[in-house]
Amino acid sequence: MVVAPSLVPKKPGDRVKTDRRDALKLARSHRSGDLTAVWVPDEHSEALRDLVRQREAAKQDQLRAKHRLTKFLLRTGQRPPLGLKAWTERYMRWLAQVRYTQPAQEITRLDCMNEVEHMSARVKRLEEAILEVIQVAPAPMQEVIRGLQALRGVAHISAVTIAVELGNITSRFESARGLMGYSGAFPSEDSSGKRIRRGGISKSGNAHLRRIVVESAWSYRHLPRVGEKLRKRHQGVPAEIIEIAWKAQNRLHKRYMTLMNAGKDQRKVMTAIGRELLGFIWAIGIKAEAAANRQQLAA
């Protein structure tokens, strides 16, 4: 049993630490059930998680490079034409036509452009590597990735990120509420007696999972529908998982409209939608892993 040191109970006034006292404290806490076991990933899961997080770091570096270029253009008075959307093909052609009379500024522009192109190539290379590596992943993980793509706003890279961060959903999370708590998307609370005080989300869970889920939750602002891309992702997915995904669209969009009409801040609404989306992710993951295990037993 592997336990996170930060989750081991500790008395505030206990300032004496020895191996013998640590062993006695762990034995008492284990006997009373106060220790929280952590999931230990296997070598393949850990390696894939490192690759996915490296791609996430590359996306952050790409965003910084883009911001550095746009802020330089804004500071020097170079503004794109009205109606030109950033980072489209037309926008890139406009960037290629920008020139400066000062040689130093022109060198700066070229360096920023090269950095943006380098970061874009880096992200693309890592995404291609993820697509190759996932082909040799265990069958349960592949089924979970295929099932999660039935959800709106969860394409292949997002599904891989969620599956890698969660690991074995069946053995780790007994309920959807446990998965929501693991993400750290629950509000913090400081209540006593009749006084009830709730604050922002605790953020005490997996930040990578929370980020990708809240990002996917923005898709549920729109009316429920199955577009062409989503219809392609539904191919080969069991009907029961597609039904869960459709139920998610209806429920989460209705929840979004209710909270927005109540005057809630949109960012807080998206966090609430992302927390409920984790419940549907848990349901799909349980069914996908069960289907994969049945196929392995039949084989």
Image (tube, rainbow, N blue to C red):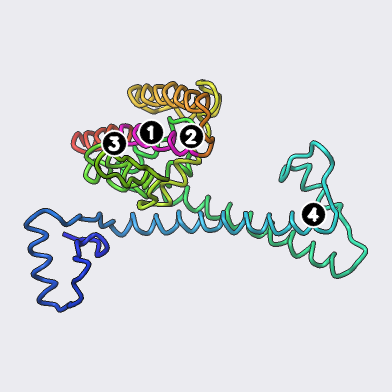
Image check: 14 left or right of 117?
A: left
Image check: 64 left or right of 78?
A: left
| Residue type, label 3 | Ala
Image check: 261 left or right of 69?
A: left
Q: Which residues are magenta?
A: 268-283
Secondary element at image label 2 = helix
The CA distance from mark 4 to mark 1 is: 40 Å
Which is in the foreground here, disc 1 or disc 2?
2
Q: Residues within 10 Å of mark 1 (few under 14, many from 20)?
A: many
Residue placed under numbered mark 3 in the picture:
176
Residue placed under numbered mark 1 in the picture:
276
Q: Could you tell which of marks 3 and 4 lies nearer the N-terminus?
A: 4
| Residue type, label 4 | Leu
Report which quarter residue 117 is drawn in. bottom right
- Magenta residues: mostly which secondary structure? helix
Residue placed under numbered mark 2 in the picture:
269
The CA distance from mark 3 to mark 4 is: 46 Å
Q: Residue furthest right?
A: 101
Residue placed under numbered mark 4 in the picture:
74
